[in-house]
Image (spheres, rainbow, N blue to C red):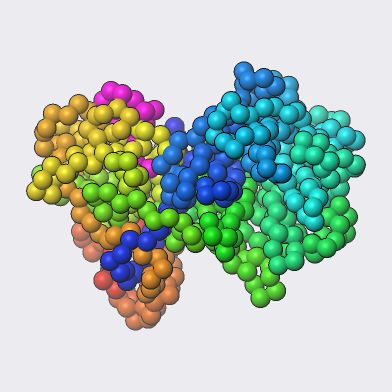
Amino acid sequence: MNTIKHYLILSVVCIFSNGVAQTFTNPIADLPDPFITYIDGYYYYTGTTGRDVSLKRSKTLEGLKQTASVRLFGSGDSGAQQGHYWAPEIFKLDGKWYIYYSAAQQGTNTFSMRTYVLENTSNDPMNPANWTFKGKIYSPSADYWAIDGTVLELAGTCYFLWSGVDWLTHFTNSDKPQRNYISKMSNPWTLTGSRTMLTSPSASELLNKNFVNEGPEVLHKNGKVFMVYSSNGCNTPYYHLKMISIDDTKDPLVASNWISHGTVFSKDASVSSYGTGHHSFFKSPDGTEDWIAYHATPKSTGDCGATRTPRAKKIAFAANGTPEFGTPIAAGQPIKAPSGEPNLAIDKITNGLYEINQINTSKLVEVKNASNINPSNIVQGNDRDGLHQQWWIQATGNGYYTAVSALSGLSLGVGSCKLSTASVNLRKPNGSKCQLWAIEDLGSGIYKFTNKNSGLAMEVEASGIDIDGSNIQQNIWLNADHQKFNLKLIKKTLNASEQKLINTVVLYPNPFRDKIHINSTAKLKDKQYKIYNNLGQQVASGVVDDDPILVEKLVKGIYYMLLDGNSYQLIKQ
């Protein structure tokens, strides 16, 4: 697979207490178009698989990456469509469960996408046998192309919002321009009356070939309904969120009652977050906080495919009650979990940030080329003090652990869940057994990693035990040195409630070509920096006041900047 490699080096220096508090890292799971809701003690999470409707649940956000999805409905089931299952959402309405999803009503023809409803009258939404197909949900006067359905409950009435097309687009057999519509619901699977168009790509957006308004989601707060939607195509880095709002006492079917707020959330190159869109809103377990889940890709060109991962972020509110979404958060960095979550599971290995190295060398288990793209290869390398050599290890509560990259938040596992000798790599966290590890203390600070799915041991390729770049794989346990590892605890899981941020430094762009900027909350004026090449030779130096730092004379490769006692990796391309 050809991938575009993008790097971000973000250093955070914190003060911690010794306690373990609840945190999570992004990405939280694997599926794009994430929908999360908190109901009856669980987070329920679903998203686009393309092949079916699947669901997982967990008592914590971090637990979503440790739990596998359950297939509820799809091709072969009664009433099911053949393919292109997109953006399911789950609701509990009048004591019953409903899932709204989009699929192609004619084979695999995406120009025939429609939105459908599943119903579950039991208390258990995780049992596929409890779900029945209720049919297509559509506007009686406009049964046109439709995706991304969601529900607004307001003053005892339910409304359905979705992304669709106008009559002209429908009759020309096209799916663009996409617009957002609303209609009244007479029951959870039936629309009544005519539809109202709420948003449409503007004339300037159409001129720039921005043909997409989709993914409408509603946040009812502070006497207003905020409808936030995705604009632009997911195949661009500019996929972003816009917002309109209405007083909750007004009729949402009257388009003129809605006020536009423009763009409210978009890409941030400094944290390698592009195509930030197709979101959902959910409450914290204790109901005191509002959160947004969205997907993004580290690919600077944007992506509608496998590199998109779901992330979560707490929402702030302005003095006038308007939500403020801020900017994307770097993947792989611990974040204080939603209020009211139960404590993290703790096992024999302390939850925290680690370096992992084979016992007879100083080489560390690392992500090859410091890649943050799904999937990425895992090798051993010389200690470079980089985030790609650091791992957040977290107990699952049943004797196993997840290990996620501090650089990307992707999970350490075995590609294709093979049961024989196979490379260990980094992929989106999906809760599968091949991303879970037993970590056994062999004594004297030596540990064995055993994959839950295969029962095989992690090892450095025996023939390359002393070689920089040697492959990390799984194999039959031989009780050999190349299968034994040391763990170095860098810091325990963040006690986020007592976290005191001292200093945040961002170097950008990274990779760079001819100049580097330094952005920091610390007082770095007059601080000296030194840049070293991969052989440890100093190749540049100066003071932070020199902004930008001109480095056009450096050849392509990996470099390290020493600044204020910390080391930062840089890549010149």
Residue extent of the magenta highlight: 411-423
Q: Is residue 114 left or right of residue 249?
A: left
Q: Nearer the viewer, residue 536 or 445?
A: 445
Q: Is residue 476 left or right of residue 286?
A: left
Q: Quadrant of the N terminus?
A: top left
Q: Nearer the viewer, residue 294 or 94?
A: 94
Q: Is residue 374 left or right of residue 108?
A: left
The residue lying at 62 percent from left, 66 percent from top is 324
Residue 206 visible in the picture: no
Residue 507 % position (x, y) = 41, 64
Q: Is residue 556 left or right of residue 53?
A: left
Give the quadrant of residue 168. top right
The residue lying at 81 percent from left, 29 percent from top is 173
The residue lying at 57 percent from left, 36 percent from top is 124
The residue lying at 38 percent from left, 42 percent from top is 411
Residue 91 higher or lower than 73, as above or below: below
Query: Any magenta on residue 415?
Result: yes
Residue 567 visible in the picture: yes
Give the quadrant of residue 132. top right
Total tally of numbered discs in the picture = 0
Residue 535 % position (x, y) = 20, 55
Q: Nearer the viewer, residue 352 or 524?
A: 352
Residue 536 % position (x, y) = 20, 58
Give the quadrant of residue 484. top left
Residue 195 % position (x, y) = 86, 44
